[in-house]
Amino acid sequence: MNLDYIVREPENITSKTPILFMLHGYGSNEQDLFSFRESLPADWILVSFRAPKETQFEGYSWFDIDFNNPDQYINIDQAKDASDIVLQNIMAISNKYGLTENKTHLCGFSQGGILCYSLALKNPDLFNYVACLSSYPEEKLLTDIVKDKKKLENLCFFVSHGTDDAIIPFEWGKKAADLLYDLSCYFTFREYMSGHGVNQKNYIDLMDFFSK
């Protein structure tokens, strides 16, 4: 399945050009995280995907969510399918641009971030910087992750969460710090006085992370 996406291309593209893939949250669309583009490195390719499932109010989702059932909060089968589809599209787009010696980065918000944890920890050889915003690592999607510390060395995570998040509890998001610490991954965990979103300080810290 080919996902719809929007892209910003730099003037010059070589086999070493970095590329950032963006995965939006539930009920949003590909324009959401793409709004970060003015602050991201000008020499990167930016690709913002649109999730395949339609939601209310002209939004899209990667998988269904049951807000009333914390034990079955996400549809695991749909999430696994979505992760596979995203990976296929990442590989196809990277091949299209002839990116063979580059760095590939991920940025996901909410359920997009859930997929980023899965993609990066299952395929650490493919990714470098990974930003997971207002999200959490879903254990049921991480049953077969790579645990070889040597293979995880290339990954560097930026994890952020609002202390007043009413959609994904702060305690869920904080699980990422324990997981990444246990895996000996490079990561920074930031908490902000905000709800389910990215406030200005979070945005500035995120751009600083991607500029290193």
Image (cartoon, rainbow, N blue to C red):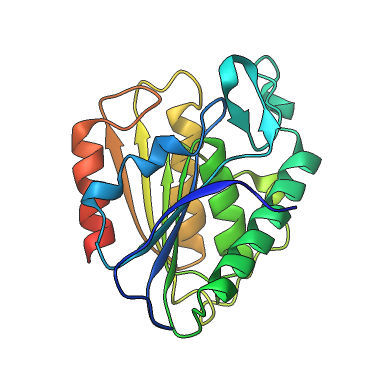
Quarter holding the C terminus is bottom left
Place of residue 11 in the rendered image (x, y in percent of width and height, measured from the top left) = 29, 69
Residue occupying image coordinates x 54% and y 79%: 151
Place of residue 106 in the rendered image (x, y in percent of width and height, measured from the top left) = 46, 57
Residue placed most toward the observer, 161 or 58: 58
Place of residue 181 in the rendered image (x, y in percent of width and height, measured from the top left) = 44, 60
Of all residues, the one furthest to the front in this rendering is: 11
Q: Quadrant of residue 34?
A: top left
Residue placed most toward the observer, 183 or 18: 18
Residue occupying image coordinates x 49% and y 79%: 99
Residue 142 showing in the rendered view: no
| Residue 91, above or below 158 | below
| Residue 21, above or below 124 | above
Of all residues, the one furthest to the right in this rendering is: 77
Residue occupying image coordinates x 22% and y 50%: 39
Place of residue 178 in the rendered image (x, y in percent of width and height, measured from the top left) = 47, 51
| Residue 45, above or below 36 | below
In the displayed structure, does residue 133 sit left or right of residue 50?
A: left
Count of marks overlaid on the render = 0
Residue 207 showing in the rendered view: yes
In the displayed structure, does residue 147 sit left or right of residue 109?
A: right
